[in-house]
Image (tube, helix red, strand yellow):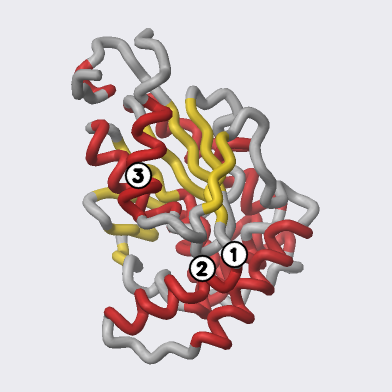
Amino acid sequence: MSLWTWATWPGCDMVITIDGPAGAGKSSVAKRVARELGIKYLDTGAIYRAIALILAEAEIRPDHDEYLREALGKISVELGDGKVLVNGFDVSGEIRTPEVDGLSSVYSAIPAVREALLGLQQEQKNYGSIIAEGRDVGSVVFPDAEAKFFLTATPEARAKRRFNERRAKGEEADYQQILAAIIQRDKNDSGRETAPLKVPEGAVYLDTSDMTEDEVLQFILDKVREIPEK
């Protein structure tokens, strides 16, 4: 099959979703798919992390419903050029910590938070083809996406990846702590009442425990390229 990009097809707006648990490799693969196909990458997880960070810093607890809704109405999140801006301030580095990862799991389970961010995410498809990754993008945010994937791996495999990533950055890392955090995150995300983590209807399920990132990338690209041209 000849090479092509979705961006070269006039009038073609496509949505690709990748869901899965923490540490499944969704972000890195989604970014590479976006580059390969010439489409935009929507990091929904970064949006929730940014919101969680700001709410926590403002000492607004998840059960502060009245204050929570008021605060959400004053928060603006922008994504672009690899940066995450909240009310104009760059928080890209601050949201990539284990602490914020835990906060994100808690705040993202709140209906008011998900409602506030749902429209922000959905409107992104109005600006061209996108690939979005998260935990409910294929089931809630973009249920009619043309291509859906669910990436997973054993908790041990995901913890090892996170451990290696942090060590590669020169950060201190404890494998057992990372594994425990991932197991707890899985429990929180799968057990919450609002938009629990699940395999979206029609999604391609892929266990990446024994796959390299290149293999996962090629698998997704092959599946997407099987979709008939509009």
The residue tagged 3 is: 217
Tell me which corner region of the image, top left, top right, bottom left or bottom right, holds residue 128: top left
Which tag, 2 or 3, sits closer to the chain's start? 2
Residue at which label 1 appears:
154
Is residue 160 shown above or below 223? Answer: below
Q: Quadrant of the N terminus?
A: top left
Instruction: Judge whether 161 appears above or below 26 on screen.
Output: below
Q: CA distance from mark 2 to mark 1?
A: 6 Å
Indicate the amino acid at tag 2.
Answer: Arg
Q: Amino acid at mark 1?
A: Thr
Q: Residue furthest top?
A: 230
Q: Residues within 10 Å of mark 3 (few under 14, many from 20)?
A: some
* Residue 76 visible, this angle: no
Residue lying at 54% horizontally and 66% vertically, measured from the top left: 52
Kindly identify the residue that appears in the image at 40 percent across and 20 percent down. 226
Amino acid at pointer 3: Leu
Residue 157 is at least partly visible in this image: yes
Give the SS element for disc 3.
helix
Q: Which secondary structure lies at badge 1?
A: loop
Tell me whether the residue at label 2 lies in contact with that at label 1, contact meaning CB atoms closer than 8 angstroms.
Answer: yes
